[in-house]
Structure formats: structure tokens, C-alpha cells
Amino acid sequence: MLSLLGMIWGGTFLVQEMALAGLTPFWLAASRIGFGAALTCAVWGWRGGRLFKVAPTGFQWVSLFSIGFLSSTIPFMLLAWGQQYVTSGFAGVSMASVALIVLPLAHVFVPGERMSLRRVLGFVIGFAGVALLVGGQALDSTGLSLEMPGRIACVGAAACYAVSSVQMRTLPPVDPIGLSAVLLLIGALGVVPVALMVEGVPPVPDARTLWLVAFLGLVPTAGANLLRVTLVRSAGPVFLSIVNYMVPVWSVLLGALILSEPLPPSLLTALVLILCGVGLSQYGALRRLFLGR
């Protein structure tokens, strides 16, 4: 499931770039979240529309809305604004930093997700692999006056993803499809008004853009969000955060396969570092999987 999620999100950049030719950034975000929310809510309603399996507290309701805004509304807007002023390399590295941000948060707030020297070392090695894959352009300057605020926005988006994953793990027993539907619905209710205020009435997209938006709403939004919810609730936010090391690898590989982009010479070394980091950080889980102890 983790590998599938990494492949889906890694290929999203290609589709999103094509969709941006016919739709403005905020309206693209609003459209894909809105489509994903409508689809997931329909499936959830067909299954009975029940969310919590036990009566939630008022604090847990507040936490649910917080997760919705932090997992989609706020990071989508921060990235849409920040990527106008930073290099794509910096944006990629900032997303990979989610794993490093999750680690101390989970140590404090999630039972059973304790930090250890082996786990920290594994995450640092994996992050080094991502940095090697992205290359030196991650530190290049765009020369734009708002570059520093743009970088802060990208790192802020990564922090939002990290905090929402940790919060999601602390919720009481829930229906995963219902949770996915509610989070996307909250995200849509937050993004659509902002898109209207910032970009005005959306342009009428052509048929090609509509198909691309439908794909973005179905696969990397609705489908991937359900995978994300399932992984966080079953394996924990630390395990899920590893996907941020896989996304740039899939992005590079799919770019080479679909767009015939050249493969960077550092790909193999970066992949070895990432896999070693993942293996080291998840040594206990891998040992139980393969040795049964």
C-alpha cells in the first residue's frame, strides 16, 4: 500500500502540470478536492454514512476539523503560492522533510512510536538519498524577492502534513472511508472560497482539462487519501511518512518512462540510500514480517 501510494503521488506532478495549462492553481486544487470529496462521500453514504464507531468527545470533533484543514486546505494553498517563488528542487526536499518532522511529534503524542537512535539514523539516511536525487538545484536561488517567504510556505505545508498525520492516529475508532470523505469535504469547503477570492470566477475548462481534473480527483485525491487514512490508522504516522522518500523516486522514473526525461546519474545511489534508510528505520517491522519474531 505504501509503495502504491508513493507511485500515485509521484505521478501526480505530471498530470497536474498538464492540467495547469487549462486551469489556474487554486481552482485546480479546489476542483480536484471537490471532485474527490463528492466521489468519496457518495461511497460513504452508500455504505451507511457512519463515521465514529464510539461516541466522540468535543475535543475529538475539533481535532477532526483541524485534520481536515491541515491535511488539504492549508498545505494546498501554501504550496500553490510558495512554488511560484522557489525551485522545484526545494519544494521536493521540503516535502521529504515531512518524515523528519513526524518523528519527534509521534514520539511525544503517539503511544508506541518512540524515537530510537536506529530509527533517527534511518530517517536521516533516507532524507540524504532524496537530497542526492534532487541534486544541488534544491539550494539554488530563484532571485525573486519573495523567495524566503515561498520557502517558509513550502516547509509550512510539510509541517501541516506531519501534524495532521499524527492527529489522525489519535482519533477514536472510525470508518476509514467516512474519515476520508469528511476530511476531503472539509478541505473543499476551505479551498473553494479562497480560490474564488484570489482568482475570481474559474475559467470554463476544455474537455481535456476536465478529464485531467477527473483523474486527479479520483486517483491521487480520493483514492490516495483513502490509502493514507488506512495506513495512518493501521501502521502509524511514522510508517506513512516514509512515502515522502518514495515520491521523488517515482516522479523521476515516471518522467523518464512517459516524458523520456533523462535519468540522473545519482538515481541508483539515491535509491540505495533511501532503501537502506527505510530498512534501518523499520527494522523491527521487517524482522517480524520475514522471520515471524
Image (tube, rainbow, N blue to C red):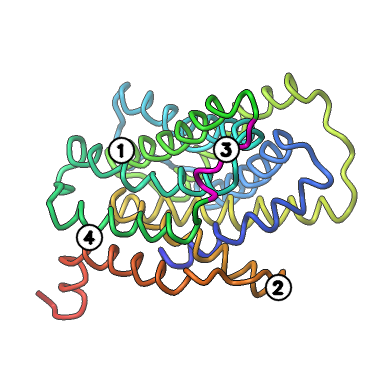
Residue kind at label 2, given as amino acid type: Ser
Lower position in the chain sequence, tag 3 or tag 2: 3
Name the residue nearer the viewer: 234 or 107: 107
x, y percent for residue 231: 36, 56
**Which mark, residue 281?**
4
- Disc number lying in front (1 or 3): 3
Lower position in the chain sequence, tag 1 or tag 2: 1
What is the crowding at mark 4: few (fewer than 14 residues within 10 Å), some, or many (at least 20)? many
- Image point (72%, 37%), residue name: 25
- Image point (81%, 51%), residue name: 210
What is the crowding at mark 3: few (fewer than 14 residues within 10 Å), some, or many (at least 20)? few
Relative placement, left or right, of 38 versus 18 is: left
x, y percent for residue 167: 32, 36
Between the residue at mark 1 and the residue at mark 4, the CA separation in whole angstroms equals 25 Å
Residues tagged 1 and 3 counted as in contact (Cβ below 8 A):
no
Lower position in the chain sequence, tag 2 or tag 4: 2
Q: Which residues are magenta?
A: 137-143
Residue kind at label 4, given as amino acid type: Ser
**Dot 1 lies on which element?**
loop
Q: Which residue is mark 2?
A: 260
- Disc number lying in front (3 or 4): 3
Q: Which residue is mark 3?
A: 141
**Which mark, residue 89?**
none
